Amino acid sequence: MTKYTFKQKDFKVFSVEGLDNRMKAIEERVRPQLNALGERYSKYLTEATGDKFYFHVAKHARRTVNPPKDTWVAFATNQRGYKMLPHFQIGLFESQLFVMFGVMHENQDKGNMAQFLNKNINLLESLPQDYSLCFDHYKIDKSPINSLNTDDLKHHIKRLKEVKKAEFFVARTLDPKSDILKTDKAFTDFLNETFDEMVKFYS
């Protein structure tokens, strides 16, 4: 029996009709893994960075009509919340598992992230080919790192600094059918490798 990974049927919770029914499906079929991943990787990131990390499993509490199209566990150094801080995420859409690190538009210190990225643009350019960038966490679409040149990267970093609603995440994704999701060992090895790469952007 697996503890951390997700089966193909788990991704189907996002096709369940109705807010209450979908939330029940997420609670039963996805949230146990998110909690287990939260416990494991809050410790992992604490050890990797030297800063105390806490995990936050999405509750979707503000929703009253529209059911969520994704769900996640986020990791940040504040016990009360994560949106205002640089943070890590593990989450699911129906057709994608994603792992990300970056800043949302709620972050008041996006300029610090932009400054770091400008000074370390080589870190972005040296990311492995299966990494991508996400500029809107609400959307499933991500830009493969190999599709972006230096000018593209500078444009998005400048936008992060100057546009209030701008976001910037380093991301890595899996298809729900990926062999990596078939065992906890393969999945946690993938997550370990991914977070070790993403920690380079945490400053």
Image: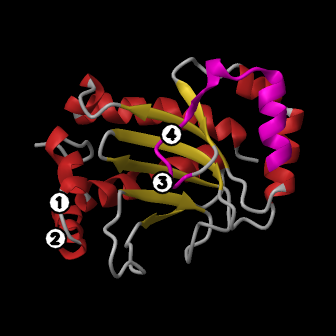
- What residue is shown with label 4? 141
State yes or no: residue 78 in magenta.
no
Q: How many marks?
A: 4
Q: Of the residues tagged 1 and 3, which is closer to the observer? A: 1
Residue 181, quarter of picture: top left
- What residue is shown with label 3? 43
The residue lying at 18 percent from left, 70 percent from top is 24
Q: Of the residues tagged 3 and 2, which is closer to the observer? A: 2
How far is mark 1 from mark 2, CA to CA?
7 Å
Q: Of the residues tagged 3 and 4, which is closer to the observer? A: 4
Location of residue 81 with respect to 137 vertically, above or below: below
> Is the N terminus in the top left, top right, bottom left or bottom right quadrant?
top left
> Residue 188: horizontal and vertical position, in percent?
35, 36
Do the residues bearing badges 3 and 4 touch, measured as CB atoms within 8 Å?
no
How far is mark 3 from mark 4, CA to CA?
30 Å
Q: Look at the numbered disc 4 and give the secondary structure of its residue.
A: loop
The residue lying at 58 percent from left, 19 percent from top is 128
Instruction: Give neighbour class at mark 4: few <14, some 14-19, many 20+ (Cα, 10 Å).
Output: few
> Residue 11: horizontal and vertical position, in percent?
23, 46
- What residue is shown with label 1? 16
Sequence-earlier tag: 1 or 3: 1
Q: Which residues are magenta?
A: 137-159
Do the residues bearing badges 4 and 2 touch, measured as CB atoms within 8 Å?
no
- What residue is shown with label 2? 21
Q: Looking at the picture, which amino acid does disc 3 mark? A: Lys
How far is mark 1 from mark 3, CA to CA?
33 Å
